[in-house]
């Protein structure tokens, strides 16, 4: 069966093979987001709301490797505004044999990230990272961003909370042209199941 054209309703066999990603299946919303990004006069903080959708897929067979995962998309809006300031789309993947969680995504600014890390199948906290120049878990940017706002490292922690929500903390580490040191572009939010 073509895993990229499966129906939207979750297949129970796929969900049971998602390991630590299984609790994320569904639609989630949160309005407690805080984004700290570089701006002309120093860091700028934006409060935001977002909506994430996770649809199961799999198995995806790469020779002896078998992956299960989630198609996902997210959109974020500044609180009180109708125009989105961030979107991304991609996949979360689970490799049960090697116990690896992966998140591969693209943002329409011209950045792609493949982040990953080790995890237990029943993990409640997932930690993933990627760095520029890595041939496995890495970051690629378009030529402008590579010069002006180069992402040198990406770190993400997702926590599945006891109340059924989940939280994340993201740190996109940037080398900003004309500045010394690394700017930590951070995002965090807590989301609850909408359906």
Image (cartoon, grey):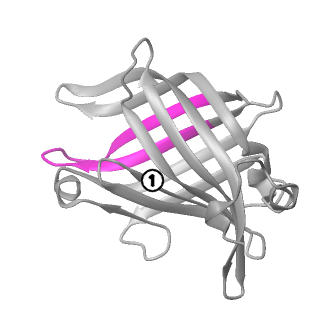
- Could you say which is closer to the camera, residue 5 or residue 39? 5
Vertical arrangement, residue 4 with respect to residue 25, above or below: below
- Could you say which is closer to the camera, residue 156 or residue 70? 70
Question: Magenta region, mostly helix, strand or loop?
Answer: strand
Q: Residue furthest top?
A: 80
Q: Residues within 10 Å of mark 1 (few under 14, many from 20)?
A: many
Instruction: Please say whether residue 182 is one of the residues in the magenta stretch.
Output: yes
x, y (%) of residue 151? 33, 54
Q: Quadrant of the N terminus?
A: bottom right
Residue at 49% over, 68% down: 137
Q: How many marks?
A: 1
x, y (%) of residue 17? 82, 63
Residue at 44% over, 37% down: 186
Instruction: Please say whether residue 187 is one of the residues in the magenta stretch.
Output: yes
Circle 1 sits in a helix, a strand or a loop, which is it?
strand
> Which residue bears the numbered disc 1?
154
Specify the quadrant of the image occupied by residue 3. Answer: bottom right
Q: Residue furthest left?
A: 178
Vertical arrangement, residue 37 with respect to residue 45, above or below: below
x, y (%) of residue 131? 42, 63
Vertical arrangement, residue 143 with respect to residue 99, above or below: above
- Could you say which is closer to the camera, residue 134 or residue 95? 95
x, y (%) of residue 98? 73, 75
Residue at 62% over, 40% down: 53
> Left or right of 87: which side holds 121?
right
Q: Quadrant of the C terminus?
A: top right
- Could you say which is closer to the camera, residue 150 or residue 87? 87
What span is in magenta?
168-190
> Left or right of 74: which side holds 190?
right
């Amino acid at each position: 069966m073509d895993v990229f054209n499966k129906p939207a309703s979750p297949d129970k066999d796929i969900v049971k093979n998602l390991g630590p990603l299984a609790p994320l299946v569904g639609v989630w919303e949160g309005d407690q987001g805080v984004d700290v990004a570089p701006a002309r006069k120093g860091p700028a903080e934006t409060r935001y709301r977002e909506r994430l959708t996770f649809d199961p897929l799999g198995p995806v067979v790469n020779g002896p490797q078998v992956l299960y995962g989630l198609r996902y998309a997210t959109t974020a809006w500044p609180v009180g505004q109708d125009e989105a300031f961030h979107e991304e789309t991609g996949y979360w993947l689970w490799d049960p044999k090697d116990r690896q969680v992966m998140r591969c995504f693209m943002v329409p600014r011209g950045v792609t990230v493949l982040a990953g890390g080790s995890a237990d199948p029943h993990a409640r906290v997932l930690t993933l990272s990627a760095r520029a120049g890595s041939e496995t878990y890495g970051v690629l940017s378009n030529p402008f961003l590579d010069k002006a706002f180069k992402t040198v490292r990406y770190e993400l922690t997702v926590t599945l909370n006891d109340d059924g929500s989940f939280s994340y903390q993201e740190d996109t580490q940037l080398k900003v042209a004309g500045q010394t040191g690394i700017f930590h572009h951070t995002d965090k939010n807590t989301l609850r199941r909408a359906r």
